Amino acid sequence: MIDSGPDFSMLEVIPVNRLLVIGAPLVLASATPVEAQFSFTEQTDLLGEVSLSGAPMAVVDMNGDGRDDLIRLHETDRLLIDYQEGPGEPFSSYVYGEVPRGSIWAVCAADVDRNGFNDLFLGPSSGGAFLLKADADGASYALAGLPDRDIFVQGSIFADFNNDGNIDIFACDDNDDNHRYRNDGTGGFLLEPGLVGDALPSRVSSGNYAAIQIDYDNDGHCDMYLSKCRLGVTDPTDRRRINRLFRNDGSNSYSDEGPAAGLDDGEQSWCADFADIDNDGDLDCFVLNHGPGASKLFENDGSGSFTDISASAGLADIDYFGIQALFRDFDNDTFVDLLVTTSNLGGSEATYRLYRNNGDRSFTRVSNVLQTEGDTPISYLHSCALGDFNHDGFVDIFGGRGTLYNEPSDDQRDLVFINDGNANHFLGVQLRGRLSNANGIGARLELHGSWGVQLREVRAGEGYGIQNSLTKIFGLGSATEIRKLIVRWPSGIREEIPAPAVDQFLQFTEGGTWENGDFSQPLIVSPLVTSMIVDKPLRYRVATSNLSLSFAIGDGPPGMTVDAESGVLTWTPVAEGVETVEIKVSNPAGVTSETLTITVEPAPPPPDFASAINNSDLVFSTSETPWFVQEQESREDGQAFQSGAISDDERSWVEITVEGPGDLQFWWKVSSEEDYDQLVFQVDGVPVEEISGETGWRMVSYEVPEGTRRLSWSYEKDGSLSNHDDVGYLDEISWVATDSDGDGLPDDWERTNFGDLSAGPGDDPDGDLSGNGEEWTAATDPNDPASVLRILRVTREVTGASEVVFQSVAGKRYVIEASATLRNFQSVTEEITAGADTTTATVLLYAPGSAGEITYVASNAEGRALVPVRSLDGLWRGGDEAGFAAAG
C-alpha cells in the first residue's frame, strides 16, 4: 500500500490532483501520438537580467518547491539563479554575483549535505573547483573549496559512487587525470583517487571532456562513459582521445569495456548521451564528435553491445563542431528526440539541429523550430540546458549563444524557449532518497504501457559542463492510462507503482510503497565515535544499512538537534570534554538505539609567528585564508611564514602594527606566476615593494616613518593561471624603533616637529601644558596649542548617542571636534579632563533614520574626525567601528 503520511508518501503537485489507485483493473489505451510538429515560443522576458553565457548552465529545482529553476553564468563568472513562479509569471532572481577563480567551465547541482536544498558545483579553468552550499533555508550560498587546485575542469557530475547514500563528485580534467571527491557524510569532500574503482588508472590521463553515469547493460549497477578529446593529438589510436566505457561489477570495481562494447570512439568527442530511442528497454548512445561525419548513433542490442546506425537513422549529416547533445521527448509522443548545439570552431557554421524521433529508429530534422519574437528563426545555439519552465509537462529550452569553447557572445543574449505543447499526455516524476542519496541520483525509472517500456535515469551533470532537470518527464502520446512505474533506487530497493494517473507530477520518496512487513530492523552503520573542536559546528549523519524512516536523539548535550528525516545531527560545543548522545532510528519493524561518543578537543593554539620569524616582540594578525608557520622552506634551517592557499582574484595577508619611526628589515621570497601573481609589502595599505615569479630569499630594508603604521605582506593572485608553488614566504623580521638620543622621543618625530634632536620630553613649546613626551604619547601636535586628540574607536548606539574612545594624557583637558569638511571644525563636547591614557566620552554622533557615508581625515591627521554633516543635530551618519579605528 501507499502510506498517506507526509514522511514517506508519494505526493502530487500541480497541475493535477489525483489519487493513485493500486490494483485497479486496467484497459490500456494505445499510445498513438497526436500529430504535431515541435513548436516553441521565445519568452526570455520571463527572466530579469540579460545574460551572455558560455557553455555551462543548469536547470534544477533550487528552492524545493518542485518547479525547475535556472542557473546562469553571465560572462562565465557572474552567477544568477532564477526561481520559477507560476505559469507565465516572471521568474524571481537571486544574484550571487561574480564567483572566484575566473571563468567557469562546468556546473552541476545536488543536495550534498541533506539539508533539503541543492548545492552547486562550479569548475573553473584554474584555481580549483568549489561548491556553493545552500544555507538552512536555501536563501543564500556559502563558498566551500575542494582539495587540490591543480585542475582544468571540464564536464563534471554528482553521483554516489560508493553507494553509501552520500553524493560524491567526479570532475573531468582537460590536462591530467580526473578528480574524484568523496563526500564524508556531512557535505565535506576528500580527494580520493580510488573512489571510482582502482581500474580507472591515471593513464586515462588528459583530454577528459564529459562524464555520464548510466546502466548500459541493465545489471542494476551504475556504469560510466567518459568522452575524450585532446587538442593537437591527431592519432585516433592515442588513448588521450579514445572514449572509455567503465563497467561497474557492483562492488565499485570497474573495467574498461569500451572496445568490447563498440564504444571506444577515437574521433575527438565533446560529450555523449544515453537514452532508449526505441522503447525496447535498453539504453542507446549518441556520441558527439568533431568533423565531417564523425558523430554517431549507436544502438544497444540488449546485451550491452553497440552498433553504429547513424546512416540508417538519418543522423549522418552531423558534420560540425558540436558542444551539447541531449535526448528528450519534446513532443511527448513516447519517443525521445535529439537536440544538438554547436560551436563555430574550425570555421564551421555555428548552428543547432533538432531531430524528431520517427518511432522506427530513425530521426527527421525539424528546421527553424526556434524563433525569436517576430517569428525570426535563430541561427544557432552554442549551449543549452533543458527543463520545464512552466510546469506543464513539456520540456523547454534555455539556450546560450556563445562561441568557440566557452566564450560568451558580445551581443547575442541567452534565450528561453517555452514548449507550446500539444494534446499528448505526460507523467513527471521527482525522487527523494532516504537510504539512497537525497536526490535519487543514479536511480532508474521504467514506465510500462502500450508503448512498451520507457527508461529514464536520474543524472546530476550531463553533456559538456551542464545540468538538466532532475524531474523525469515521460511523454505518453494519446494514452490516458499507464500500466506501472518501476523505480530502481541506487540502494537496491525496487518499488512498483501500479497505474499512476497521467498528466501529473509525482514526488516520490524511497520506501513510499512499502508495507510494514517489507521493513527489517534498522541497523546503524555510521561510526559511533567522532571528534571535533570546541566552538566549531558539528555535522554528523546517522547512516543505516537498511531503510529507516525516522531519526531521533535521547540524552545528549544541550543544543544538539537531529533532522528526523535525513538523520543529520548538528551541534556546536562551547567547552572541551567528552559527550555522549543516544541515537534512535526507527521504521515499522522496530527501533534501534546506539550511543555516539563525541570528544570535544580544545582549539589549537595560534601559530607561533614570533618564533618563526625570530622576533618575539611583534604581534601578528592574518587573513581569513591565513599565513601559517612551516618548516619546509626558510631562509636558514628553521621555520618561516607561508601564505595561505588561495584562488584566482584572492589574497592572503599577514600584518603588524608598529609605532614609527623605526628601521624594518625582513627576508622574503615567492614562487608564483611571473608578473601576475605577486607578493606585496605595504605600509598603511600602500604598496611599497613587490616580487613575482620564482625568486630566492631576498632582504628588504625600510625606514618606517613616524606614527602608528600598519605593515602588511600580501600574496595576491590575478584572475587566471597558477605556476610554481603559488605561495609567498616571509622570515627574519627585524624592527627597531629609532631614538638615537635616548630621550624617549623618536628621531623622525623630533626632526619633523623641531628640525633636530634638541627637544626634550619635558619641553612644552606650544604652551598647552603638555610636554613633548605627553604630546607624542597622545599623538598630538607639540607646536599647536589647538591640537586635539586622536580618536581610537567609536561605538554607535541605537539611541543615537555614541561612545568615543580617544588617546589622552591623564590630567589634561580635551575637546572633541567634528566637521563636514577639513575646515570649520566645531566642538561636540565640553572640556574633558582625562583620567588615563585613554578616555571615553559620550557624544551625539549619529542621528537615527539618517543616511550617508562616513568619511575621515587621513590617518596621520591631528586626531580630528571628519563627519559628513553641516549641523550638530546628527553628526555621524554611517560607517562602522572598524572603519573609524582604521582611520585613526
Image (tube, helix red, strand yellow):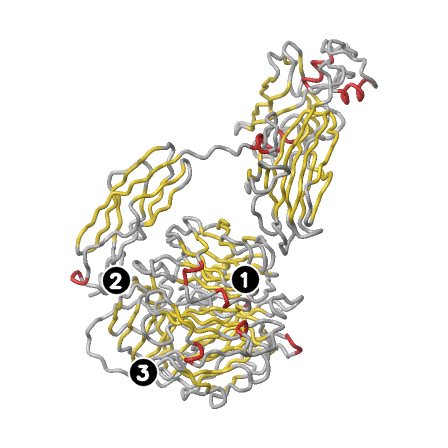
Estimate the x, y position of residue 70 in percent, counting from the top left: 49, 62
C-alpha separation, residue under disc 1 versus residue under disc 2: 37 Å
**Quarter holding residue 423:** bottom left
Between residue 673 and residue 22, name the one nearer to us: 673
- Horizontally, residue 376 falls left or right of residue 684, namely left
Category of crowding for the residue at label 1, using alpha-carbon neighbours closer than 10 angstroms: few (below 14), some (14–19), many (at least 20) = many
Quadrant containing the N terminus is bottom left
Q: Outermost residue toward the left?
A: 517
Outermost residue, bottom side:
312
Which numbered circle lies on residue 511?
2
Mark 1 sits on what residue? Answer: 153
- Residue at 61 percent of width and 34 percent of height: 879
Q: CA distance from mark 1 to mark 3?
A: 39 Å
The quarter of the picture where the C terminus appears is: top right
Residue at the image point whose x is 59% and y is 64% from the top: 53
Of residue 779 and residue 40, the one placed in the foreground of this image is: 779
Q: How many other residues sit within 10 Å of disc 3, few (<14), some (14-19) or many (≥20)?
A: some
